């Protein structure tokens, strides 16, 4: 079997995929690319569909799709459909539910020629089923790091918190940090992101009154692991009213757990099964989370 994974860019080596800072590439296309020998498939990836491919997996097209990528992909997928090739949609963010999303039109156009879909959470499967009547399979994201035992922590005068995420998640963090009622304690913050996310945080730093020290660094698996060793906990603010995040996977929460860190997070639907093990970022202020570090470490263990 020859599979082509349709994603932005061009890729000469599997390492370029499984080391990408884009979770939608690294944890989906990258995971398959890394194990092509074991699962005995031929594999290619990028903007141009390999003519030899019999199966095309459609990854996340990206917010700049209206600059020409949507037309390029749609034309290629229509040709593949006429050639009776199998088209599988890997749907990881609910852009069909967000009218303002530039990606919504692309997904609407390709659903009729998609033979099945893969999603990263059961909640995403429910959302997609409103638009798509073919088979939908849930394949959750992998745990990419060794699982570390939780630290035994107590309240600290100067706690250090870790946040990691793509630039698309940065606004949720900034909004939370500017909420004086919920973010009611001073702390140091280590933030790991891509360039655009780091730029947004740097430009907003003067308005983040609760941050006594902000350390910004490029996200990588190793940087994340290293940062976790000097952190007391992890922040994962989101927006429960943003339809693009309503079907998000539990990936970041589970990764924070695997790092051994107590977590303060929004209660996304995919996080609900783990609600007993983390602090609800909207129900209680940050100071309460700090006082209960030890309790959350024990729950996490």
Image: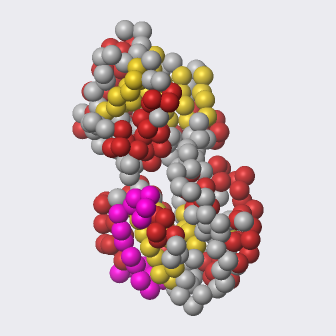
Q: How many marks?
A: 0
Q: Is residue 107 one of those drawn in magenta?
A: no
Q: Residue at x 58, y 20 (%)?
A: 134
The residue range painted magenta reads: 206-223
Which residue is located at x 65 percent, y 50 percent? 269
Q: Is residue 23 above or below residue 148?
A: above
Of 197 and 65, the residue lying toward us: 197
**Residue 39 at x, y percent in the picture:** 51, 27
Left or right side of 88 for 15: left
Q: Residue furthest front?
A: 37
Q: Residue at x 60, y 27 (%)?
A: 136
**Is residue 220 placed above or below 297 in the rendered structure?**
above
Viewer-nearest residue: 288 or 214: 214
In this view, the residue farthest toward the left is 67
What percent of the width, then of the height, locates residue 282? 63, 68
Residue with the most extreme top position? 83
Residue at 37 percent across and 8 percent down: it is 83
């Amino acid at each position: 079997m020859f599979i082509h994974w349709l994603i932005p860019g061009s890729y000469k080596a599997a390492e370029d995929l499984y080391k990408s800072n884009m979770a939608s590439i690294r944890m989906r296309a990258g995971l398959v690319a890394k194990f092509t020998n074991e699962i005995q498939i031929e594999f290619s990836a990028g903007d141009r569909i390999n003519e030899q491919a019999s199966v095309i997996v459609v990854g996340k097209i990206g917010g700049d799709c209206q600059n020409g990528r949507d037309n390029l992909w749609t034309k290629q997928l229509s040709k593949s459909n006429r050639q009776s090739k199998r088209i599988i949609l890997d749907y990881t963010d609910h852009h069909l539910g967000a009218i303002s999303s530039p990606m919504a039109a692309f997904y609407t156009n390709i659903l009729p020629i998609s033979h099945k879909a893969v999603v990263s959470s059961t909640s995403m499967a429910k959302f997609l089923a409103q638009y798509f009547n073919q088979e939908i399979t849930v394949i959750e994201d992998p745990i990419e790091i060794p699982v570390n035992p939780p630290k035994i922590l107590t309240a600290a005068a100067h706690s250090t918190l870790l946040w990691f995420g793509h630039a698309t998640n940065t606004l949720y963090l900034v909004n939370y940090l500017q909420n004086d009622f919920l973010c009611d304690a001073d702390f140091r913050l280590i933030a790991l992101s891509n360039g655009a996310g780091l730029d947004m945080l740097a430009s907003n730093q003067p308005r983040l009154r609760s941050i006594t020290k902000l350390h910004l660094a490029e996200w990588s698996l190793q940087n994340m692991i290293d940062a976790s060793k000097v952190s007391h906990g992890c922040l994962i603010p989101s927006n429960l009213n943003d339809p693009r995040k309503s079907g998000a996977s539990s990936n970041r929460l589970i990764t924070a757990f695997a790092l051994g860190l107590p977590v303060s997070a929004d209660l996304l639907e995919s996080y609900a099964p783990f609600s007993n093990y983390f602090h609800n970022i909207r129900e209680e202020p940050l100071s309460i989370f700090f006082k209960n570090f030890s309790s959350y470490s024990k729950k996490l263990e």
